[in-house]
Image (cartoon, grey):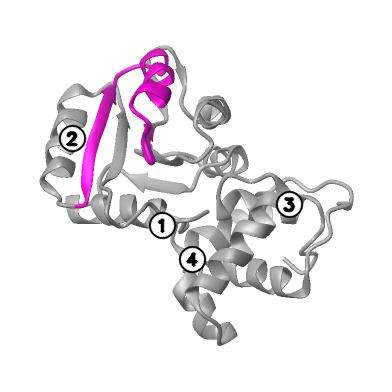
Amino acid sequence: MAPAHPSAPIRVLLVDDHRVLASSLAIVIDAEPDLVAAGVASTLAQARALMTTAAPDVVLLDHRLPDGDGVAAIGELLALRPSARVVVLTASAAEHVLVAAIEAGAAGFLSKTRGLDEITQAVRSAAAGESVISPELLARLLPRFSRGSSSRVELTEREREVLALVSQGLSNAAIAERMTVSVHTVRNHVANLSAKLGAHSKLEALSIAVRDGLLPDL
């Protein structure tokens, strides 16, 4: 889950059927020196095509699209470009929709009512492998993650410690400070545990860990 290369702009794919909103966001993103609008799609069909041709680092994905449910399509989009980070654009999504997005691999959520500076910062955070979600919302959603049988995946003590801190909504920098290690070390732990769990994001790794009983205290 390494961040985008610092010398290359973060490529953003906008998937929203509100053309004015999408076009406006594209202009804002292109105005940032470290961001570039790699494409704009108004349907899931267009998004699927652009996942490979536009090679996005971050996808801002609307929940409701003319040809389907954006949340339900997250897995398919990530299969086309596993390195991408998907941030779901929401108007007033119910908690069960947000949980489904996390379990499908979303890096987080972004309200359409947020300011432009918050949107660009969310893109940067997602590209860096961070979770785009408030600690308060994460705390509300955690109990809703589905729980099943115990997992056969073995995590190290440090990986479990990282996951526990992720569950508190902490950033990699905050986790590094809490564990008195470097941010690079935290990123390596997150990358290793995500690979073990088959997750595309820190939030998905957390949902899988809860589901598989790897963090029973949550």
Whole-percent x, y for residue 214 in the image: 80, 60
Tag shown at residue 196: 3
Q: Secondary structure at mark 4?
A: helix
Tag shown at residue 26: 2
Between 76 and 143, the one lying in front of the other is 76
The magenta span reads: 34-61
Res. 217 visible in picture:
yes
Mark 4 vs mark 1, CA separation in Å: 18 Å
Which mark sits nearer the N-terminus, 3 or 4?
Answer: 4
Q: Identify the residue under disc 4.
A: 135
Q: Are marks 3 and 4 in contact (CB under 8 Å)?
A: no
Residue 91 image-quadrant placement: top left
Location of the C terminus (image quadrant):
bottom right
Residue 7 image-quadrant placement: bottom left
Mark 3 vs mark 1, CA separation in Å: 20 Å
Q: Secondary structure at mark 2?
A: helix
Mark 2 vs mark 4, CA separation in Å: 28 Å
Whole-percent x, y for residue 150 in the image: 89, 53
Q: Secondary structure at mark 1?
A: loop
Res. 168 visible in picture:
no
Q: Identify the residue under disc 1.
A: 128
Q: Nearer the viewer, mark 2 or mark 4?
A: 2
Residue 156 image-quadrant placement: bottom right
